[in-house]
Image (cartoon, rainbow, N blue to C red):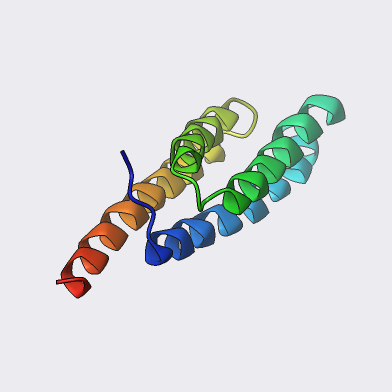
């Protein structure tokens, strides 16, 4: 079970906030550069951005970190529309994992 700490919430919220911006920008890139039809591009790009914002609001609950991990997988899978998202999704997944582990380590040290 995940112990939610204020530092972990802040770090993970930062990752999801930046990811929401990148996911939102996925839409025009998919349409204009990759030639994806507008409907699926909007559904994936804006949908992923909205999902990031929703999960950010739920980060005080332990289940939100599982949902955030699912968001990371979806970000990587969005590379099917815009291939650069394979790379960016992997970067955000690494940041997500790092945020969780760093917060646990730092807050574990400061609580002693």
Residue drawn at x 46%, y 59% as measured from the top left: 9
Return the x and y of residue 92 as percentages of the image width and height: 45, 48
Return the x and y of residue 45 as percentages of the image width and height: 71, 38
Residue 65 sits above or below residue 111 on the image:
above
Return the x and y of residue 68 as percentages of the image width and height: 50, 41
Viewer-nearest residue: 35 or 49: 49
Residue 3 in the figure: left or right of residue 13: left
Residue drawn at x 46%, y 56% as measured from the top left: 12
Location of residue 34 by image quarter? top right
Residue 87 sits above or below residue 73 on the image:
below
* Residue 101 shows up from this direction: yes
Return the x and y of residue 79 as percentages of the image width and height: 56, 31
* Residue 33 shows up from this direction: no
Viewer-nearest residue: 26 or 61: 61
Number of marks in picture: 0
Viewer-nearest residue: 14 or 39: 14
Residue drawn at x 54%, y 40% as measured from the top left: 84
Residue drawn at x 58%, y 58% as measured from the top left: 18
Location of residue 112 by image quarter? bottom left
Q: Which quadrant is home to the N terminus?
A: top left
Residue 87 sits above or below residue 39 on the image:
below
Which residue is farthest right?
38
Residue 17 sits above or below residue 30 on the image:
below
């Amino acid at each position: 079970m995940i112990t939610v700490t204020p530092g972990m919430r802040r770090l993970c919220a930062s990752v999801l906030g930046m990811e929401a911006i990148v996911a939102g920008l996925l839409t025009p890139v998919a349409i204009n550069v990759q030639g994806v039809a507008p409907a699926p591009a909007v559904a994936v790009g804006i949908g992923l951005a909205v999902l990031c914002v929703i999960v950010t609001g739920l980060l005080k609950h332990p289940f939100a970190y599982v949902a955030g991990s699912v968001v990371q997988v979806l970000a990587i899978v969005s590379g099917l529309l815009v291939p650069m998202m394979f790379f960016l999704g992997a970067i955000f997944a690494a940041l997500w994992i790092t945020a969780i582990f760093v917060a646990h380590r730092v807050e574990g040290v400061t609580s002693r």
